[in-house]
Image (cartoon, coloured by chain):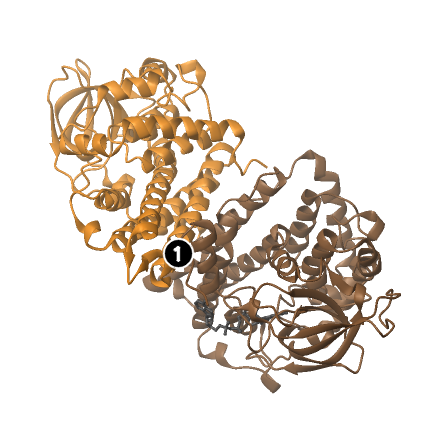
Chain colours: A brown, B orange
Amino acid sequence: MELDFGPDVRDFRDEVRDWLADHLVGEFAEHRGVGGPTDGAAWEVRLAWDRELSAGGWLGVGWPREYGGRGLGLLEEIVFEYEYARVNAPYRATVNALDLLGPMLLRMGSEAQKKRFLPPILAVEELWGQGFSEPGAGSDLASVRTRAELDDGGTSRSSGAESGGEWVVNGQKVWTSFGVHADWLYVLTRTDPRSARHKGLSLLLVPTDQPGVEIRPIRNLAGQDEFAEVFLSDARTGADMVVGEVGQGWRTAMATLGIERGTTLLPQQLTFEREAEALIDLARERGALDDPMLRRRIVDAWISVRIMRTTNLRTIAELTAGRTPGAQATTAKLYASTRHQQLGRLATELAGPAGQIVGEGYALDRRQRSFLLSLAETIYGGSSEIQRNIIGEQVLGLPKEPRP
Amino acid sequence: MDLTFSEEQDELRKVVRSFLARHSDEANVRRLAADLQGHDPVVWRRMAGELGLQGLAVPEEYGGSGFGYVDLGIVFEEAGRALLGGPYFATVALAAEALLRCADEQARHDFLPGIASGGTVATLALTEEGGRWDEQGIGLTAAYDETGGWRLNGVKTYVPDGHLADLLLVAARTPSGTSLLAVETADAPGLARTPLPTLDQTRKQARVEFTDTPARLLGPEGTAWPALERTLATAAVLLAAEQVGGAAAALDAAVEYAKIREQYGRPIGSFQGIKHKCADMLMEIESARSAAYGGLWALDAGGDTEIAIAAALAQAFCSEAFTKVAADNIQVHGGIGFTWEHPAHLYFKRAKSSEVLLGTPSYHRELLATRLGI
Ligand SMILES: Cc1cc2nc3c(=O)[nH]c(=O)nc-3n(C[C@H](O)[C@H](O)[C@H](O)COP(=O)(O)OP(=O)(O)OC[C@H]3O[C@@H](n4cnc5c(N)ncnc54)[C@H](O)[C@@H]3O)c2cc1C
């Protein structure tokens, strides 16, 4: 099914196609499909690719022009993402800032924050990490303990802040994706020490280039160290580095987590489709198609990716028609993450004993890496159990779990 | 892109839902289920007269209103939700579609207006004792003799609403291949029809015996299979939409009960064992929606291959989704869900019968694999 978004965007689509054909060459072309939401492979090449995209004006297609964006609509963003995924371009290294922080600032940031932070994101000059999770606050994010106090005696060190003192931040964050590369973190902190749960939290923008911030890589089960733990010891940031209002950090954080992912669903989907096709090829090579049990699982894998695609298209169609996305937008993550793991399990099984051999220094091939990293998909961004709670309570309206 | 519904389509859904809430409520569903005929001619006429549901997707030149399959899918989804009894699926999804696909313009003019007006109940008689939906399953023969025209000999069974159809479209073997023939049942000689007692009492089936029964050949002899295959693909998608509706109703019932039934001093829906089950049911239904809607969009806008693929996918997935959700609904209800008085079993049985109505999920997986070249 080739997508056609209508005559209005056909010129735009051709422009994207032409540009990608001209620029996705050489080293970039060799890194087709490399990387993922938690896969930091070939980081330097991907950063260079992001800069190439930036120079071509392809980062922030939907962001306002005044902050360095293209000022186009959601449809163009989707078309861009679709064409991007179609040619299997490298996974963008700066995706965290582009998909999460940027849209959040656009929605809730102050004018000064937008002016200060958005252009360097699009220019790939500053990289960002998300500092929400803590050792004691994962699924239960409302129990964050990292504290921030306003020290109004000092003068601001962080860029752009003129007066009003500084926040002093103490605590520990963990599982920060690409944290080792981050120049800045957006951090959920408790600014009212007497508060409990959702109340009294604030979202702060904290520079990492200071003595109060220590970032230690954590090795994941695939042998990569792309996520990190972050120690904040009297780390400082300007008083004006609160996004939204002081004490309203929960709302800001939830907005970030809930930011419409219509543009990112489709590319992920096309990656899964590619994996499913590779799986079918592999099965054919290995003569597995004659085994009725395997055959059934292979067809089911194909069905899953096709359903994910249609589900995403439904959501995109609703968004572009100005409708509120239906329940499928909430169930999609649960479905995709569990089905992607099944796909990975099947692919590894089909690859047989040879598929179990890794390279020197635990170097994994693409299939092995995708399979292992898929285990995180049912954990990050809200675990499957938490997704089921959300679906049960917020979509179906079932009574809440008793909470303390 | 029109992968979402328009306001008019939302309105259609609302109108159909409220009509069915009145005419296919639990009492009526049970009344028709208990009756071997299972047909309410008054409701049938109102469906045609007030809402134009039988002719919704029939082109205007044949007396219909010329809407698309997405619109028709909405009606089937609502029909599934309400467990609508009677010959709607047989008439609209099977017979009208077979007429539209067969190469016989005259037959369309002769039969479709009657279907659209609600005057004709029709069905497709394809399956035989083997219960197969493929071409090889067709054993009944039609023969031509100069004096009497075409005559049918043999047995069709598991024919949806075959006992009450005014018009039977019969797939038969002729010397040059698979052909489609029409039998108008009123006073047809050599025709014996027996309603079959069914596990799912909300959808009736019949056994139909032909002994030298005169029939009218539709289109050129021996060329009917591609048209029938397409008919089955369309029916598969519409059945999938119906299954989605049934599953959604089962989930609604489960959720409603989970909110009010208390154990251990709190509603059972606050326990994750039940809450997560309901969330999984919704995920299953939304995925099934994608499968069914993908099929409807393909029917409206896709080519033959795409339709064939989308249809097989829709049946393979939606059949199992409905059965799973309907069974989970019984589980959420506990003991009460296991009683004859509670409607949960009606959905479960409808799910099971729908699962085999047009071929099992395994059969559709195999169709899909073949069509994908796997
Ligand atoms: C690869 C990866 C990248 C990540 N990147 C980031 C990042 O960039 N920034 C960031 O802030 N965080 C990040 N995270 C953290 C992620 O958001 C958390 O891991 C996740 O929210 C789960 O929290 P936890 O690890 O503390 O597990 P826990 O919350 O301790 O959960 C452990 C288990 O208990 C279950 N559980 C917990 N609560 C409930 C409940 N109420 N009901 C039922 N079951 C429950 C969970 O589902 C899980 O199975 C990342 C995680 C991973 C794996």
What residue is pinned by disc 1?
B280
Can residue A143 be seen by looking at this rendering?
yes
Looking at the figure, which quarter contains the C terminus of chain B?
A: bottom left
Residue occupying the far bottom of the picture = A361
Tag 1, which secondary structure?
helix
- Give the class, few, some or many, for how many residues have Cα within 10 Å of label 1's Cα (few <14, many ≥20): many
Front residue of A62 and B92? A62
Percent coordinates x, y for residue B163 in the rendering: 16, 27
- Badge count: 1
Instruction: Tell me what residue is drawn at x 71 percent, y 73 percent.
Output: A148
Front residue of B263 and A315? B263
Percent coordinates x, y for residue B2 in the rendering: 56, 35
Dividing the picture into quadrants, the one containing residue A388 is: bottom left
Instruction: Tell me what residue is drawn at x 78 percent, y 51 percent.
Output: A19
Identify which amino acid the numbered label 1 is placed on: Asp
Instruction: Tell me what residue is drawn at x 28 percent, y 15 percent.
Output: B119
Percent coordinates x, y for residue A85 in the rendering: 64, 55
A17 horizontally vs A143: left or right: right
Percent coordinates x, y for residue B270 in the rendering: 37, 59
Can residue B305 be seen by looking at this rendering?
no
B147 horizontally vs B233: left or right: left
Dividing the picture into quadrants, the one containing residue A238 is: bottom right
Identify the chain of the residue marked 1, using the numbered disc in the image.
B
Looking at the figure, which quarter contains the N terminus of chain B?
A: top right
Dividing the picture into quadrants, the one containing residue A1 is: top right
